[in-house]
Image (spheres, rainbow, N blue to C red):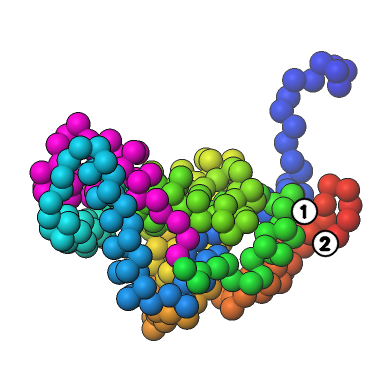
Amino acid sequence: MSLAHNTEPIRPIKGSQSPIMLKAVLFDLDDTLIDWSPFSHDQWESMETRRLSRVISHFRDSGHPLSDEHAFKSEFMLRTTKAWNEASQYLRAPHIGNVMMEAAAAVGVPASLLDTDTVMRAYDWNIADGIGLFPEVPEVLGILRDAGIKVGIVTNAYQPMWMRDVELATLGVLDYFPHCRISAADVGFLKPHPHIFETALASIGTEASETVFVGDDPTADMVGAKKVGMRAVYRPNVRRPHAELEVTPDGTITSLHDLLNLLDGWYPGWRKTSAGVTR
Ligand SMILES: [Mg+2]
């Protein structure tokens, strides 16, 4: 039989399988790419009050008086806390839009004004004052992109991703993540639930073995990523130090520059671009 008619599948010669190549790096967002250390709880409260005041103005402009501002704000805060407490028991993600609609309904806003998207645009989430990326983030994202490595974000935010995208755009890094930006609020599950990681892998189009995860949370990020078969790199959170780790991370870093060194050890040659240039 000539080779042209050989329909046998090509089998790799035993022992000659190609090494697994790095194809993607997935990042947690808060305290991994965005540095929240300059931000205080008091700042959060005053920012939240301003955002909720914009929602109240929206309801009033739409014809509902909403006479008790304080009741609405406290309903929202209490329901947010309750939603997170319930969510963490079952890893079912809360959604800020649902919490907002329930709080508004509880103080008498009629159903005709409870369009989640419209109300959340009035809330006008944006980047918190004084917050920025860790300084090395743009450079490292650029090195990964130039080497053909896809990058993505998987966050336990209760905001849908379109809201967090506003921050990424303001920080100038939205365009680095065209394939995969996943918020727990959209997926319905919180890390470490495997579903949110599997959704991210499907979205970025790589296998777990070809993908590295970087995060600051020992449970949500490290346990979750390892459970689905990814290498997990730990960036300890300077704001909320964790005393004990449930699993041993594959690597620990203090800067994303250290991540590049880890990748050099695990995937020799990954920096070579398709043009043969080493970054
Ligand atoms: Mg985090």
> How packed is label 1: few (under 14 Cα within 10 Å), some, or many (20 or more)?
some
Q: Residue at x 79, y 20 (%)?
A: 6
Q: Residue at x 62, y 56 (%)?
A: 172
Of 133 and 15, nearer the camera is: 133
Question: Residue 58: x percent and y percent?
Answer: 29, 44
x 56%, y 75%: residue: 252
Q: Is residue 248 visible?
A: no
At mark 1, the secondary structure is helix
Marking on residue 146: 1
Q: Amino acid at mark 2?
A: Arg
Instruction: Return the residue nearer the eye: 52 or 257.
Output: 52
Chief secondary structure of the magenta portion: helix
Q: Could you classify mark 2 by the number of other residues whose Cα lies within 10 Å: few (under 14), some (14-19), or many (20 or more)?
A: few
Residue 153 appears at what percent x and percent y? Answer: 53, 53
Q: Quadrant of residue 260?
A: bottom right
Which image quadrant for residue 61? top left
Give how far apart the Cα atoms at labels 1 and 2 are. Answer: 8 Å
Check if mark 1's residue and mark 2's residue have beta carbons within 8 Å: yes
Q: Which residue is mark 2?
A: 279
| Camera-nearest residue between 4 and 2 | 4
Q: Which residues are magenta?
A: 99-128
